[in-house]
Image: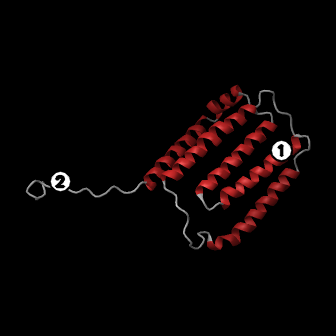
Amino acid sequence: MEVLLFAVSAALSLAGGVGVVAARQPVHSALSLLLVLGSLAVLYLTLAAEFLAVLQVIVYAGAIVVLFLFVIMLLHARPPESRPSPVGGQWGLAVPLGAALWAGLSYAVLRLPAGGRELPPEFGTTEAVGRELFSRFLLPFEVASLLLLVGIVAAVVLGSSPAPPSVPPRSASGREEA
């Protein structure tokens, strides 16, 4: 049963990943990302990491996807016009590199031992995650939060329309005041 759940979750995650990249509408990409993040939460549950699964749903599937949708709506995303692909001639390099990455990952996965390794009993608990996050990974955690903040501010600035030019007020006589 666990293998079936893993296979279905992995397939949904891969399908969502393809949907993120292949969707033409930004909202559809965000919804595909939601599928990926939900599938990853199920994969965390199969690893007996309940806390990480809940964090995945609340923080990523909840907050981050809502943030992405907010930015998409703020930018008034319109359907793409009919124009040539911006990647153009890069497909000739991207396909062989993607195939090489797939082959390398497949080779690495097939070399893993069948039984896996035993996880410590505190793996994925609130205490263990908090200890690691706020001790060993404090700087990367803060850098990631700053990058998200900069990205949001940049999206708002780039997406906002320019302010209309200010016209100096006119006096009752019709002449501009200094």
Residue 110 locus on image (x, y percent) = 88, 52
Q: Quadrant of residue 159?
A: bottom left
Horizontally, residue 86 falls left or right of residue 112, namely left
Q: How is the image coloured?
A: secondary structure
Out of 148 and 165, give the one closest to the viewer: 165
The numbered dot on residue 169 is 2
Residue 75 sits above or below residue 118 on the image: below
| x 55%, y 63%: residue | 79
| x 71%, y 53%: residue | 16
Q: Secondary structure at mark 2?
A: loop
Count the marks: how many?
A: 2
Residue 1 locus on image (x, y percent) = 89, 40
Residue type indicated by callout 2: Pro
The numbered dot on residue 6 is 1
Horizontally, residue 6 falls left or right of residue 55, namely right
Q: Residues within 10 Å of mark 1 (few under 14, many from 20)?
A: some
Residue reaching furthest top? Answer: 127
